[in-house]
Amino acid sequence: MVQCAVWNCNSSNNGKDCQLSFFRFPQDKVLQRAWKSFCRREDNFNPATSFICLLHFKSEDIENRMQFEMGKSRELTKKEKINHV
């Protein structure tokens, strides 16, 4: 099961019909620190095993969102940017 790492976000993929995409933390240490800070969590979680859900990104951050929404792509890919939430 994947659950969003952002504090107070209850998004997870525990349902069979989950239509929400989750993104791994970037490996770049600068972006990783920014994402971790964005999560506003006080615990020391591991970004290597954590995810942020689609709800925390702007539409323009997603490369193939339209194809996904039209059913032509099963996955969304994130541009190499920080999320904007």
Image (cartoon, helix red, strand yellow):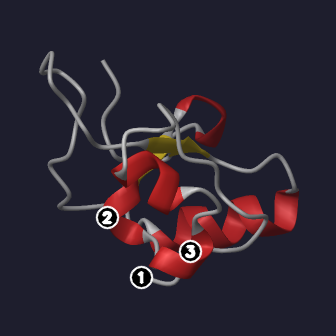
Please report contact status of discs 1 and 3: CB closer than 8 Å, yes or no: yes
Could you say where residue 67 lies in the image, as x and y percent from the top left? Answer: 50, 51
Q: Is residue 75 above or below residue 52?
A: above
Label 3: which secondary element: loop
Q: Name the residue under label 1.
A: 85
Instruction: Check disc 2 and give the amino acid type.
Output: Leu
Q: Is residue 60 above or below residue 46?
A: below
Q: Can residue 49 be seen in this view?
A: yes
Residue 6 relative to residue 29: left or right? left
Could you say where residue 30 lies in the image, as x and y percent from the top left? Answer: 84, 68
Q: Name the residue under label 2.
A: 55
Instruction: Give the CA separation, mark 1 to mark 2.
Output: 8 Å
Say which of 24 and 21 sits in front. Answer: 21
Residue 70 relative to residue 83: left or right? left
Could you say where residue 80 lies in the image, as x and y percent from the top left? Answer: 79, 64
Question: Which mark is first along the chain, 3 or 2?
Answer: 2
Instruction: Check disc 3 and give the amino acid type.
Output: Asn
Q: Mark 3 points at which residue?
A: 83
Instruction: Give the CA separation, mark 1 to mark 3.
Output: 6 Å
